[in-house]
Amino acid sequence: KLVQDGMLKDIYPQLSLAAEIFLIAPISTATVERDFSTMNHILTKLRNRLTTKHVDQLMRISMEGTNTLNEEMKDEIINYWKKVKPRRLAV
């Protein structure tokens, strides 16, 4: 009740800040582990030279799905990859 009324914030500002940080911190690391797993699926031996920006974009698409992309963004992505010169794969 004291925390809800804000009385403790006036008396103990640093302690109340620590309590707020503690209450919003995630309880498990499952989401972080899931993100690293997604990144490991994206970054393979054949794709080890991706820039941070490209990895970020691929992870967003992988986690959120292509439904979040509007048609303009999809066309931009397709046009970008059409312009990139073909590469040989070292097998």
Image (cartoon, helix red, strand yellow):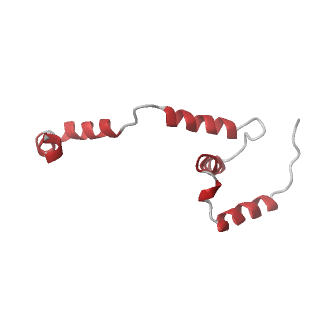
In which quadrant is the N terminus drawn? top left
In which quadrant is the C terminus drawn? top right
In-front residue for pair 84/30:
30
Q: Position of residue 53 (x, y in %)?
A: 62, 51
**Lateral position of residue 80 relative to residue 11, left or right:** right
Q: Is residue 65 above or below residue 71?
A: above
Q: Quadrant of residue 28?
A: top left
Q: Quadrant of residue 45?
A: top right
Q: Is residue 22 above or below residue 69?
A: above
In-front residue for pair 80/3:
3
Q: Position of residue 33 (x, y in %)?
A: 54, 33
Q: Which residue does the image show at 16% across and 44% down from the upper left?
A: 9
Q: Which residue does the image show at 47% across and 32% down from the upper left?
A: 29
**Lateral position of residue 10 relative to residue 15, left or right:** left
Q: Position of residue 44 (x, y in %)?
A: 73, 36
Q: Position of residue 60 (x, y in %)?
A: 60, 49
Q: Is residue 45 above or below residue 72?
A: above
> Looking at the image, how many numbered discs can be counted on the residues?
0
Q: Which residue does the image show at 69% across and 41% down from the upper left?
A: 42
**Lateral position of residue 32 relative to residue 87, left or right:** left
**Lateral position of residue 43 relative to residue 34, left or right:** right
Q: Which residue does the image show at 81% across and 61% down from the upper left?
A: 82
